[in-house]
Amino acid sequence: MRALKYLLVASPLIIAGCASQPSLPPPEFPGIEQSDKIVIHDQRPSSESEKEIFSLLVTSSAYAIYRMPDTATKPTGPRLLAHRAYETFPELGSQPNINVHHFVTYANLQSQLRKSSLVAGLTGPIGVAILSRQELPVGDVLTTRIDSSIFEKTAGGEEYTRAFFSAEENPEKSPVNLIYIDAEMLGQRIASRCLVPPIKDKPHLFLIEAMDMCITNHLALYRSDAVKETAAK
């Protein structure tokens, strides 16, 4: 399936490329309590909500790859997914249930940290994680539908490979987040992989903002499937 590109509007409050600029407050989501009626059935493996540093050894293929914990954002990824789904699909009012099979976020900082020999975790904006004034190459947020069964085969010792990317996706080898969402709602189960590089005019991209972009693209896949089903009838 052709990857979806999330088109972003430049913020006048942020100076492009200024990685040393002080952090802005994380975004808030007014009215999120309106979606409290949506029941989230969290069926994820417990590890997906926990922090993991896969390797501190520079020569390891798992070096500088991290799994981000649920506590890294407020709200959590599954909770924001439920809220955006509530806003997007009025039909959820009569079927207020979402089964979340997977929602997990990885950070891949290999290239940048190998260059600087800096060991650090990604707990906030991508720009803060890279302790330098270097301007990072920007790119597009790319979302692709995936097969859940293939994704699940990489659990265990190969989990860190979920944070890998292709040269076509990230030619400059910028630090990225890889966000995987696998959720079932309104009778449809869809899984997606979302790559979030540094974004133009947003040097302080908070993790919750990256999740929000990926959630928007993920929910668009349900609309696409619904159109296909209607056309087939």
Image (spheres, rainbow, N blue to C red):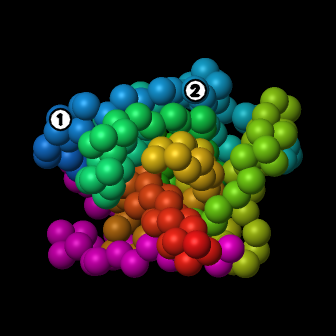
Residue placed at 73% from the left, 78% from the top? 168
Disc 1 element: helix
Residue placed at 81% from the left, 30% from the top? 156
What residue would you read off at disc 1?
33
Nearer to the camera, 141 or 181: 181
Q: How many marks?
A: 2
Which residue type does callout 1 highlight?
Glu
Residue placed at 17% from the left, 35% from the top? 33
In the displayed structure image, the side of residue 84 where residue 160 appears, left or right: right
What residue would you read off at disc 2?
43
When the figure is inspected, residue 88 is found, relative to residue 103, above or below; the finding is below
Disc 1 to disc 2, C-alpha distance = 22 Å
Q: Is residue 20 magenta?
A: yes
Quadrant of residue 9 within the rendered picture: bottom left
Q: Position of residue 61 (x, y in %)?
A: 84, 47
Quarter of the rendering occupied by the C terminus: bottom right
The mark nearer the N terminus, 1 or 2, is 1
In the displayed structure image, the side of residue 67 where residue 150 appears, left or right: right
Residue placed at 57% from the left, 68% from the top? 229
Nearer to the camera, 199 or 60: 199
- Dot 2 alpha-carbon crowd within 10 angstroms: few under 14, some 14 to 19, many 20 or more: few
Magenta span covers which residues? 1-25
Nearer to the camera, 17 or 115: 17
Q: Position of residue 58 (x, y in %)?
A: 79, 44
Disc 2 element: loop
When the figure is inspected, residue 112 is found, relative to residue 224, above or below; the finding is above
Q: Position of residue 95 (x, y in %)?
A: 36, 39
In the displayed structure image, the side of residue 158 where residue 36 appears, left or right: left
When the figure is inspected, residue 57 is found, relative to residue 209, above or below; the finding is above
Q: Position of residue 158 (x, y in %)?
A: 84, 39
Q: Is residue 165 magenta?
A: no
Quarter of the rendering occupied by the N terminus: bottom right
